Amino acid sequence: MQPYGAMETHTGVNEATAGATPSDRWLADRVSRHGDEDAFRTLYGRYTPGLYRFALRVLGGNEFDAEDVVQQTWVNAVEGLDRFRWDASLRSWLFGIALNGCRGLFRRRDAGWLDLEQGPEVPAPRTSPHDRIDLEAALTRLPPGYRTVVVLHDVEGFTHEEIGERLGISPNTSKSQLSRGRRMLRLLLMPEEGHEVRV
Amino acid sequence: MMSQDTNTPLTDEEQAAFAALPRDADPGRLLEERTVKALRVGGLLGARRVRRTWSAAMVAAGVAASIAFFASGLAAGQWLATRTVATSIATASQENAMQVAAAVQRSGSAYVTALAALGQLSDTASAESIAQGREAALSALYAAVGELVLLAPDDPLSATIRELMDRRAGESAGANATTIRNVVWF
């Protein structure tokens, strides 16, 4: 159900009758002020597929955890809509909340979140020439900290400054993480002799 | 989307591989319904978002409850002060420093717990009752800082807090400033 899906306007006041796609801000305002379920479902449909894929990647492919993170992201977001200042896009804000959810899961499981000083072990190499994997699968085998930076930068397109801000690290650390993550990815994707690269 | 501001730049082939990764995935309809249900249960979605509104009777009941809580807390605090603290002081000369320190820790925990309880009452208690509780807490803190300054005259933190609280006491009515030192709360 996306009752506001056919409308398209960004003016605000009469968007529900303007015959246009309502802006995020208008929908968020409806949710925040009136608990408008239709408005929420419109926002949900707009951003959940991206959020879910993002959480799925960061969490290494665990669908159950990704669903929990997405649900909690929306609950936290709706609770905090009154405080959102719209300095950034709603998408960026939602991704930040989802990322925090993922980090919380890593911490609770002692997954070595961004343990830069120690430097995680390089994942074990493939055991057989037939065990070749694609890029998506290789991402799931990266240590969580490296995987997160690679996903944020190379998949979602965040800058090192943005990544640093979200993860509480410096942009230089983000660059270093990305570099190591990419090197690990190449190890995982390295073709066996006689096989072509499959990325 | 991908910049090359790293010492391990992506090849064209790798960039293409990243660009080809899907950005969306459908988690299924169940998650949407689960999320909506969670928001409804939390009062965040519905015909109208739940707002806190208080009737006069609820306010009166809240005020009465907060005053009763405050009075019982005060009585319990005084009783504990005469019992626990006096006992601790009386035995201080006989017990070792570790036991005295433990008594300080217990009293401090009780103080913080009582403050947290007062903070949780902020939704229902009257502003006047909360202000009374806050004033009592500050008085106890003032007395405690005074003792800390005596205990460690060279500690800059205690001295600074004491100075700030002295200044605050001077700025207020001033009538309570002379008696504030005598309050025993925990």
Image: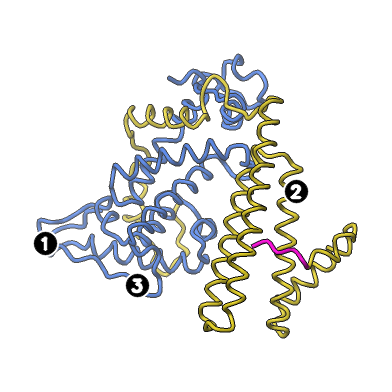
Chain colours: A blue, B yellow
Residues flagged by tags 1 and 3 on a common chain:
yes
Residue B141 horizontal/vertical position (percent):
70, 65
Between disc 1 and disc 3, whose residue precedes? 3
Q: Amino acid at mark 2?
A: Ala
- The Cα atoms of the two marked residues, 1 and 3, are separated by 32 Å
- Give whichever of A173, B124 is nearer the camera: B124
Q: CA distance from mark 1 to mark 2?
A: 79 Å
Identify the amino acid type marked 1: Gly
Magenta stretch holds residue B155:
no
Name the residue at 9% across, 61% down: A128
Magenta stretch, residue numbers? B182-186
Mark 3 is surrounded, within 10 Å at the Cα level, by few (under 14), some (14 to 19) or many (20 or more) other residues, namely some
Q: Residue at x 59, y 30 (%)?
A: A32
**Residue that mark 1 sits on:** A194
Q: Residue at horizontal 68%, vertical 61%?
A: B185
- Res A182 label: none
Residue B21 horizontal side relative to residue B123, left or right: left
Residue B9 in the image, given as x and y percentages of width and height: 39, 64
Marks 2 and 3 close (CB-CB < 8 Å): no
Q: Nearer the viewer, residue A135 or B104?
A: B104
Classify 10 Å Cα crowding around label 2: few (below 14), some (14-19), many (20 and above): few
Which residue position holds label 3?
A119
Q: Nearer the viewer, residue A167 or B179?
A: B179
Q: Which residue is mark 2?
A: B131
Q: Give the main secondary structure of the magenta stretch.
A: loop
Residue type highlighted by circle 3:
Gly
- Left/right placement of residue A193 relative to residue A100 reads left
Check the image and report above or below for B99 versus A162: below
